[in-house]
Image: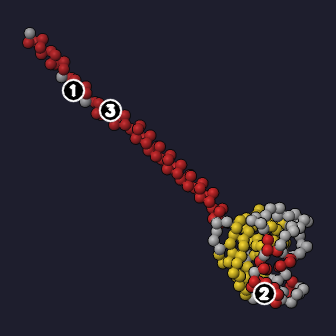
Amino acid sequence: MESEHEEPKQAAEPAPQAAEPAPQAAPASNTPGVSRGKVILGLAVAALIIFAAYFATRRSPLISTAGSPATSASITLVTSDRTDLDCVSRKGIKGFNCGFSTEIVNWQGDEQNKLKPYYTLDRHLYLIPGLFLEPAITKRFQAEIPNKPREQLKRFAAHCQIKVIGKLTGVRTRWVANAAWSNPEDIDVATVSDCKVEG
């Protein structure tokens, strides 16, 4: 009788030993969950970086054109530039247009809305409407002897506040009336204010 009661006790003893491996298996079962969490977090960070880069590139043209503040620029001029300089573009911007819509077709518009190409002293090219209507430049223009040959004109600088408002693509320019047009290029369009003349 005693032996029959002892056998169940011996059979019951291994049960705690069989339960011991369970805690060891737990970390292995959690490992895929931790890896998946890291992968998801990494993908989320990468997506955020890509979105931020895309957003920055989409905004950059606005910052460099319409959204840019006015800055100082010195434009190099002779008085004959008022009639000699011109550009060709089928497109306009904010009501401003080149003097020609094609190489042979004039755009009929007022000087204040007519774009012309001008270089700054540091050789940046802009299309600017009505530059010679600025009071200081008008005064300088009127002080020059009329109909003087271009090569005899004194070059001067107009120090202005300049604000880029956009860009025109495929623009052709010329620097002397009736001369050949340049190859097409993309040029910033800007307005000016508060010009002061030197020279």
Say what secondary structure mark 2 lies in. Answer: helix
Say what secondary structure mark 3 lies in. Answer: helix
Image quarter hosting the N terminus? top left
Farthest residue in the left direction?
Answer: 2
x and y percentages locating residue 51 in the rendered image: 56, 52
The answer to whether 118 is drawn above or below residue 22 in the figure is below
The residue that appears at 69% across and 75% down in the rendered structure is 162
The amino acid pointed to by label 1 is Pro
Q: Which one is in front in this view, the residue at disc 1 or the one at disc 2?
A: 2
Q: Which residue is tagged 3?
A: 25
Image quarter hosting the C terminus? bottom right
Q: How far is mark 3 from mark 1, CA to CA? A: 16 Å
The answer to whether 60 is drawn above or below residue 151 in the figure is above
x and y percentages locating residue 22 in the rendered image: 29, 30
Give the image quarter of residue 181: bottom right
Q: Which residue is tagged 1?
A: 16
N-terminal of the pair, mark 2 or mark 3, is: 3
Q: Which residue is tagged 2?
A: 139
**Whether residue 79 is visible:** yes
x and y percentages locating residue 183 in the rendered image: 83, 65
The amino acid pointed to by label 3 is Ala
Q: How far is mark 2 from mark 3, CA to CA? A: 91 Å
Q: Looking at the rendered structure, which numbered label has been put on residue 81?
A: none
Say what secondary structure mark 1 lies in. Answer: helix
Farthest residue in the top direction?
Answer: 1
